[in-house]
Image (cartoon, rainbow, N blue to C red):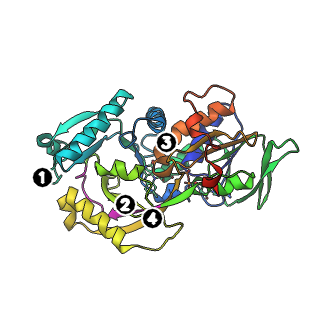
Amino acid sequence: MVVVGAGMVGAACALYAARAGLDVILVDRGPVAGGTTGAGEGNLLVSDKEPGPELHLALLSARLWGELAQELGTAVEYEPKGGLVVASTPDGLTALARLAAGQRAAGVRTVPVDASELRSLEPHLAPGLAGGVLYPQDAQVMPTLAAAHLARASGARLETGRTVTRVLRGADGAVRGVRTDRGDLLAPAVVNAAGTWGGEVAALAGVPLPVLPRRGFVLVTEPLPRRVRHKVYAADYVADVASDSAALQTSPVVEGTAAGPVLIGASRERVGFDRSFSLPVVRALAAGATRLFPFLDDVRVMRTYLGFRPYLPDHLPALGPDPRVPGLFHACGHEGAGIGLATGSGQLIAQALTGGTPELDLTPFRPDRFAEEATA
Ligand SMILES: Cc1cc2nc3c(=O)[nH]c(=O)nc-3n(C[C@H](O)[C@H](O)[C@H](O)COP(=O)(O)OP(=O)(O)OC[C@H]3O[C@@H](n4cnc5c(N)ncnc54)[C@H](O)[C@@H]3O)c2cc1C
């Protein structure tokens, strides 16, 4: 099989397919993790998923990340540190408790934390918060390292600096491989793991898939001794993730890293592939983070970067075989959760490719689920 895209998702597809016994070629027009994988954070979250198919995928993925951590944990900076979601008002806390109850019913471990306990978990949190919920299953990896190590562990033939220009199809319409700017790679199965460019790769096979970019900025502080222990974010983040608005949304997301810098997100806006720096966005992120952790007021930001989340209209990835093109599989459109969801996605693709029954129902992720007008 050929996997198009050597980001986190393509690397996970390569790993699980190789472990299922397939010969894999992993091809990317750039380097490994040169797309959105190299431009995000590495949270592996169940906490921000509402009950439904994405949460099932997140739980499967969390289990698989835990298994991979046994072999690759230190190399990929895997930290099972847990997530702490905090609410600033009693109403916000009621809404958070309601979300947590639904998640618990779906198999998520949740621990209510009242206002007086918050600072025993996070001593530097701002005073006066209403309370929160601790999610012990939330974890973190370093995404570029994770993609590189999974690609290497797969044993796949890695073809970087090679652009796919067409998906080759036989007279019967079935996939025969891909054409690249440096010759053809023949295979009876092709996996579209091209992230934000998944719509373009689908078009190379003659089918529409409406993947769009959703821009996000991250602030990186100077290295600090560990003062932020969990991934900490405000309860409104979940609503922002699920929002359909194209306008700018920011809600504070703060986490320490093994290397020392604190990462601050998260902004979301639909502005195409605009790479220009935005002071208002960065300001809003910094203000949100200092509201949660006042000590950040005295900390310098070393740099900011941005990336484009691969976004599909219903916020679910396209995952599984494409009924319109035999031999074409999609694993793209994971939006702001592609690092976390990569392992489950890779596993499900490998199961679908080898003719087994995928352990999750792929129906909600069908790549042909969008009406013609959405894809146009
Ligand atoms: C600011 C920000 C913060 C984020 N934080 C998190 C987080 O904490 N946790 C989380 O889970 N997710 C997070 N994400 C989302 C996550 O980064 C993405 O969902 C994930 O990286 C997508 O991975 P991918 O492998 O699908 O795509 P990519 O990493 O973009 O890989 C796709 C690859 O396809 C290649 N490609 C495209 N077209 C072609 C072609 N024609 N020929 C050959 N190669 C091609 C590209 O070069 C690219 O390398 C964040 C994203 C952003 C922007």
Asked if the residue under mark 4 is in contact with the one under mark 2, i.e. CB atoms within 8 Å, the reply is no
Give the crowd class for mark 1: few <14, some 14-19, many >=20 residues within 10 Å: some
Query: Which residue is nearer to you in this view: 92 or 20?
Result: 92
Q: Is residue 176 magenta?
A: no
Label 1 belongs to which residue? 127
Q: Is residue 227 magenta?
A: yes
Q: Amino acid at mark 4?
A: Leu
Labels 2 and 3: the sequence-earlier one? 2
Residue 137, horizontal then vertical, whole percent: 35, 35
**Left/right of residue 81 with respect to residue 164 in the rendered view:** left
Residue 277 picture quarter: bottom left
In the image, the segment drawn in magenta is 215-228
Picture residue at 39% right of the left edge, 29% below the top? 106
**Left/right of residue 311 with respect to residue 121 in the rendered view:** right
How many angstroms separate mark 2 from mark 3 (CA)? 23 Å
How many angstroms separate mark 3 from mark 4 (CA)? 20 Å
Asked if the residue under mark 1 is in contact with the one under mark 4, i.e. CB atoms within 8 Å, the reply is no
Label 2 belongs to which residue? 249
Q: Secondary structure at mark 1?
A: loop
Label 4 belongs to which residue? 306
Residue 292, horizontal then vertical, whole percent: 21, 56
Label 3 belongs to which residue? 341
